[in-house]
Image (tube, rainbow, N blue to C red):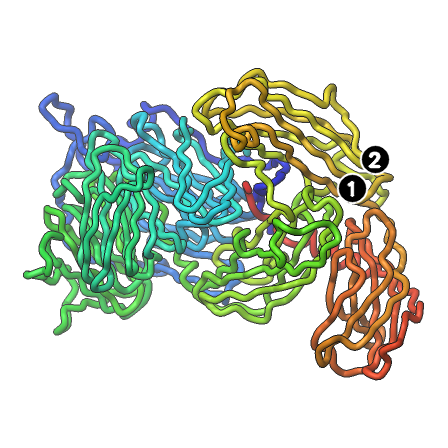
Amino acid sequence: MTAKFYGLFSRKKSNSFEGKGSGRSRSWLATAMTSSLLAWGLSIPAFSVQAQDLPGALPGYFAQEETTENRVTRSESPVQLYAATQAASNEFETTTFTFNDITIFSYFDGTEVSIFDTTGTELSSISLNANEQHTERFAQGIYRIKANQSFTVLVGDAVSSSVQGFFAVDQSGRGTSTLLNTFMVNRYTSQTQFIVFGYQNGTEFSIRNLETGDLLYAGTLQEGQYYSMPNPPNGTFLQVSANKAVSALSYGDQDYYVPASNGTFAGETFYGFSGYIGGWENSITVTAYHDDTQVTITNTDTGEVIDEYELDEGQVNTFGINAPTFWTVKTSRPVTVANIPFSGWTGSYAYMTRAIDQTGTGAGTLFYVPVIGSQVDVASFSDGNKVKITKLGLYTEKPYTLPETVSIPGLTPDADGFVTLNNGDVATFNTESGAQVYKVESTDRVSVLQSNNGFGADFMPLNFALELPDLSVSADGVSFSPANTAVSAGDNIDVTVNVKNIGVEATENIRVNVYEGDPVDGVVPLVATQIIDRIDAGADKDFTFAYSVPKFPEYRKLVILVDPNADIVEANSSNNQAEVPLLENEDLTAPLALYIEAEDGLEIDENGVVSPNPFTVKLNLFNSGLEAINNVTATITLLEGLSLNSSSDTVTITSIPAQSSDSLSWEIAVDSNVSGFNRYEIQVTADNLPITTLAAAKALDKTARRVVNVPDLTAPAKPQNFTAVKGTNDNSVKFSWSANTEFDVAGYIVSRKSGTQYTELVRVSTASEITVEGVTGLPATFSLQAFDSSNNVSGETEIEYGESSDDDSSSGGGGHFGYAMMALLLLSLVGRRKRRSLV
């Protein structure tokens, strides 16, 4: 199984983007909407100059009288609201409501998707590769989606219409992630925006056209900062990737909940945006789930306090927004925050959004729902689910004085007002006009959808994410000791990788691999590996390994892959990769950001032919400033066995206008006789912009440094002078040896021999000694092998060691050549899924 994902530091441009959606004209959209409304039996009033356009809808649509009666829709066998388990490793199912579009986003090659109606009839069968999407249009109803790999789903009318807003989610339904595939809403007015929010310092991110693979922007964000595209590509499928979790908002109207900094949609810190599209008042609406919750809202740009107040459980407060505003909400206890039609509205607003429960997933047992006059659908995920719906009252009533239980015809409440819903049942009711608050409580999980007049769009909760683990790693979870600001070539340091399980189930036997470069690109060395025994739901564990800093660390990086062979069934495996430079760089700092697209490693066939040769280095330049940057000169310098295969090493760009970009490329030939990491660097200068500070000069005069690994088929020589002595701790052994002299040696493997089998104990990069803890059962035979940057492995040098044999030295024995080990390593690279995107 393969997922393509474009990395943030140096990334090869993929040619495998074959998105399956297409933009259409406004006239076609209006016709499609009209046809759909008629097909659903909804009347469309004749145009009248006296009629008032419906807020939240396209011009020419008008408010319809709500005629939907409170009712229950019983699930028809065999379709139910499925919550997938790990019992079926190739089944990921969810059930959703829509009134027009169902858009499926794929993250992996070979994703097979089927869509069923409530009778179990298969309506559509779709084959998707990584970073593809497909949109189907259906009549209003409930649909079951089943796939062999995880996916995300956007419903409503995002593709077929306009005037919506939504945050993207990943395959776990989380609103912040390192990889998000989404859609930028169609243009309604010039006030539409596509915004990326950062939650940690040093966040590097990229935005690509999901269908073409074209890089649209790359830059950095600090905690609480945002990037708003100056000319958002309306009606375009997009991908956002980052080295640390970000969120992505497509804004064309107010109908969305805002993700918290913890990744769910309930928390204590939120960064959001409320506009004024259509001249319709937006809001910042906060709902509390605990008593004594302190709320502070500030303007993100100015720091000015917008509002402050205290809420008790179930209480709601809203602040009206009448001009585009970026804002920050911080609270003392977990809340949900939304930009929905609430402040200044009582009803007759076209929108749709999924409500959020106290867990922040959108599928839970307790919802407080701020809502104007609308339709609300409550769907059960299990049989015998006891559900109670209560109208608490207007949000201004604190405390609520006259709560009323909502009755659903056909359902008989028990003495406490609870009715019984089975798996797949949907209870539908209309809310009263006004800014009301409703409470939905249940004994098992339900989802709640609020909508009005058949307009709006949102990403839906993913049922399969409710029962699965979700392993996650990102750049903020990788640390160096000492810090990578102070390391030099030859330093022996410790690298710690923190692996999180942000899912809802524990998982075991988690392999973590560390490479010098991205193995998706080509052949790069595996420098560390370990199996973590178990990570419980909501927990994390560290993997620490010894690392010897290679020569020229300013050119190098580490890439971490969790579960590289896809052995674990999890909700979202596209967040299993992280990459960090060995030394921090300023490639993406404003106002002139540099983003290089190129292979980290090349391929080699059985005849020793390296490809691609030549390979392409593409330099993307982004001017995020407010003034043009002129006379931009880029010069590439090639080292080791690299040579220029294009006309000139220096290229000048006359001007890069403010808030725009440019790019240029070089074709680079490699000498296959110079195997190993070959370096190149690109120096960029701009000489005629008025510069007032040293920092400004540095931001416009920078050098980006990279390597490409040129593989070969020749294994390194056996290491010499292998010795072992007792370590400083009990059950520890210190091994040492003479370092190999080959240019492409990447490290060494210490193994323990049992019979004719070798069990790897530790892998160390380019050092000449290592202490292994927890060695028991002595005396024993140990072996040492060298491996190179192509993962070729030498023969073994063996030693017999017992606790009383501190003076033992290498026997020089063992002629077994490590082809089996090499084959296993290469299979590890080839057999795993390729994942990822833009950092």
Q: Extreme top residue here? A: 654
For image coordinates 25% across by 63% down, the residue present is: 366
**Above or below — where is 390 with respect to 123?**
below
Amino acid marked by disc 2 = Asp
Measured in 3D between alpha carbons, the distance from the residue under mark 2 to the one under mark 1, in whole angstroms, is 8 Å
**Above or below — where is 65 with respect to 488?**
above
Look at mark 2 in the image and give the residue it sits on. Answer: 671
| Viewer can see residue 585 | yes
Q: Position of residue 430 (x, y in %)?
A: 15, 50
User: Element type at marker 2?
Assistant: loop
Dot 1, how many residues are within 10 Å of its Cα: few (below 14), some (14-19), or many (20+)? Answer: many
Amino acid marked by disc 1 = Val
Q: In the image shown, does 484 or 91 lie closer to the viewer?
A: 484
Q: Tell whether 506 sits left or right of 761.
A: left
- Are dots 2 and 1 in contact, CB under 8 Å? yes
Chain-order first, disc 2 or disc 1? 2
Q: Position of residue 503 (x, y in %)?
A: 45, 62
Q: Tell whether 294 sits left or right of 466.
A: left
For image coordinates 76% across by 70% down, the residue present is: 759
For image coordinates 81% across by 37% down, the residue present is: 640
For image coordinates 63% across by 64% down, the residue present is: 544
Q: Tell whether 364 sits left or right of 405.
A: right
Q: Position of residue 359 (x, y in %)?
A: 33, 61
Look at mark 1 in the image and give the residue it sits on. Answer: 710
Residue 758 got which mark? none
Q: Position of residue 826 (x, y in %)?
A: 74, 54
Q: Quadrant of the C terminus?
A: top right
Dot 2, how many residues are within 10 Å of its Cα: few (below 14), some (14-19), or many (20+)? Answer: some
**Above or below — where is 278 with respect to 773?**
above
User: Element type at marker 1?
Assistant: strand
